[in-house]
Amino acid sequence: MKRALFGMFLFSCAALSSAAAPIEKIQGMLAKPPILCGRFDQTKQLAGMKKPLLSNGRFCVVAGKGVLWRTLQPFPDTLRLTRDEIVHYQGDRVAMRLDAKQEPTVRMINSVLFSLLSGDLSQLDTLFETDGSADANSWRVALKARKPELAKAIGAISLEGGAYVRNITLNEASGDKTNIVFSAMQSGSGAMLPEEAALF
């Protein structure tokens, strides 16, 4: 679940707030469809292990509602994040439900996620130092957490993209490294599968 939460959180970091990064240009490049779905391929290299952990699946971002992160391989697993909660599904069964009002970590992740999705970036300056560049068709941004508890959880992040986020790399304080590649982006009501739409 932790890996999926990281992926969901990182995908949401498509737009960032800092004078060091060309934010206005990057935000202008990013497509902002009401519904965006696609494929993710994740590679996690654990410190001290030679063989990386591989996983893939689908994600959907629905403006105003939340994010769905469905791991399909190596085993099925689904997370749904909304403004008020994070729900972990195993099959059709709710395996765990975290309430944002009761869990400080959930509240922080949800707050950042929804500020990004709504384009309200003002609070992110207090959480991250950023640096970046953009040309006509692509952009890159590096994030470094300001707060020790956030730095301990997610370390340093780099993102690359164009109209959409294409690649995210997370270097955790533990020495673990995660890379997520996004592809097959689709937008509009037809982007979601019926079983995904049912979870919203």
Image (tube, helix red, strand yellow):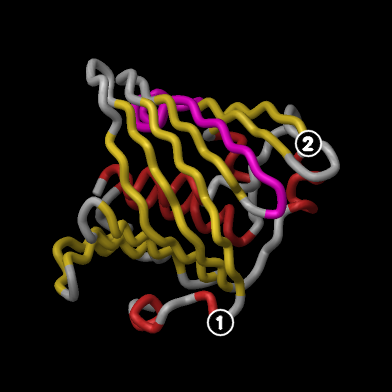
Q: Residue at x 27, y 51 (%)?
A: 103
User: Do tag 1 and tag 2 residues touch (Cβ < 8 Å)?
Assistant: no
Residue 28 placement, left or right of 34:
right
144 or 51, which is in the foreground? Answer: 51
Q: Residue at x 39, y 43 (%)?
A: 42
Residue 38 placement, left or right of 130:
left
Between the residue at mark 1 and the residue at mark 2, the CA separation in whole angstroms equals 30 Å
Amino acid residing under circle 1 = Ser
Percent position of residue 14, x then y: 60, 47
Q: Which residue is mark 1?
A: 189
In this rendering, is residue 35 above or below 157? below
Q: Which residue is mark 2?
A: 134
In this rendering, is residue 137 above or below 125? below
Number of disc labels:
2
Q: Residue at x 21, y 63 (%)?
A: 97
Q: Quadrant of residue 50?
A: top left
Q: Quadrant of residue 138?
A: top right
Q: Quadrant of the C terminus?
A: bottom left
Percent position of residue 96, x then y: 17, 61
The residue range painted magenta reads: 145-163
19 or 175, which is in the foreground? Answer: 175
Q: Residue at x 60, y 27 (%)?
A: 129
Residue 56 placement, left or right of 20:
left
Q: Is residue 159 magenta?
A: yes
Q: Is residue 19 magenta?
A: no
- Numbered disc 1: secondary structure: helix
195 or 8, which is in the foreground? Answer: 195
In this rendering, is residue 195 above or below 103? below
